[in-house]
Image: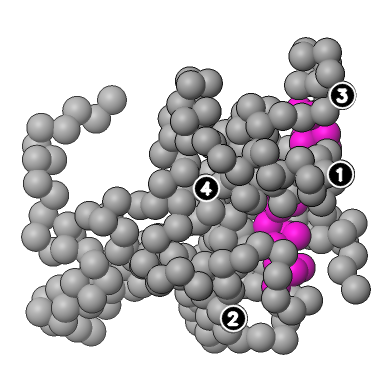
Amino acid sequence: MINKMELSNMASILRKKLGEDESSPIDVFQLVQKIENLTLIFFPMGKNISGVCYKGNKSNVIAINSGMSIGRQRFSLAHELYHLFFDKEQLSSVSYIQIGKGDEKEKKADQFAAYFLVPQSSLYSLVEEIKRNNNRKVLNKEDVIRIEQYYGVSHKAMIYRLLEEGYIGYNDTKKMESGVVETAARLGYDTTLYYPTSETKNKLVLGHYIALSEYLLEKEFISQGKYEELLLAAFRDDIVYGFEGEDGVVLD
């Protein structure tokens, strides 16, 4: 049985461990770079898989499907953090696209991700503020879009979160599923949240793998050629071949 209070507490504990408070929106992509010995991979994985987590003896890997929207990638990364920190039984896991589906561990990971990205008390305050300012008791599609933009999660992830808390009913979701991107644009928001990573940037490796490659080269455990081979395998041709136009970059 899923203990939502326990999962909410776990999410709060991990936020604190990573230097965040209990309620503010977070950039989970940046946040995970604080985690030692973690390699983060972005790669298009097709229509069924949202992410993968592998826990090793000395290093860990999380891979995220960059073919999903940016908002969905953030939710998937938070989902994989549950497997990394709290799933004590599995060394590896493959997570699928649908939110709230799968076995109990997958449902727990989704619930954890929802609390990690959209904390309970923070969501309550925001929802009540929206209702009060608009003098009504129910949320509409525009409200949902404002909330998901604030927390930086996908529309479906936000619908899942609001359903779980009882702020909207299942029948309400049908009228909230169309025209989301256009409505967001008309409300003045950047619509990047709703689109996948561009094809020129959808394959990328960050974190421990890159740092370890640098260390091995510095200590002369590997040759320059092997070092470049490792980086090219990690889609980091930018490091191998140089950063074009960097001389013209103004470092503000």
Distance of label 2 from label 4 (alpha carbons): 21 Å
In terms of sequence position, does the residue under pointer 3 or pointer 4 come before the other?
4
Distance of label 3 from label 2 (alpha carbons): 41 Å
Amino acid type, callout 2: Ser
Amino acid type, callout 4: Gly
Q: Is residue 220 visible?
A: no
Q: Secondary structure at mark 1?
A: loop
Residue at 72%, 29% (x, y): give it.
140
In terms of sequence position, does the residue under pointer 1 or pointer 4 come before the other?
4
Amino acid type, callout 3: Lys
Q: Disc 2 marks which residue?
A: 93
Quadrant the C terminus occupies: top left
Distance of label 3 from label 4 (alpha carbons): 27 Å
Residue 137: mark in rendering? 3
Q: Residues within 10 Å of mark 2 (few under 14, many from 20)?
A: some
Q: Position of residue 85 (x, y in %)?
A: 67, 70
Q: Is residue 112 magenta?
A: yes
Q: Are marks 2 and 1 in contact (CB under 8 Å)?
A: no
> Looking at the picture, does residue 74 appear above or below residue 126?
below
Secondary structure mostly seen in magenta is: helix
Q: Position of residue 15 (x, y in %)?
A: 69, 50
Quadrant the N terminus occupies: bottom right
Residue 71: mark in rendering? 4
Distance of label 3 from label 1 (alpha carbons): 13 Å
In terms of sequence position, does the residue under pointer 2 or pointer 4 come before the other?
4
Nearest to viewer (mark 3 / mark 2) = 3
Q: Disc 1 marks which residue?
A: 166
The count of marks equals: 4
In the image, the segment drawn in magenta is 106-127
Q: Are marks 3 and 2 in contact (CB under 8 Å)?
A: no
Q: On the picture, is 232 further left or further right than 92? A: left
Nearest to viewer (mark 2 / mark 1) = 1
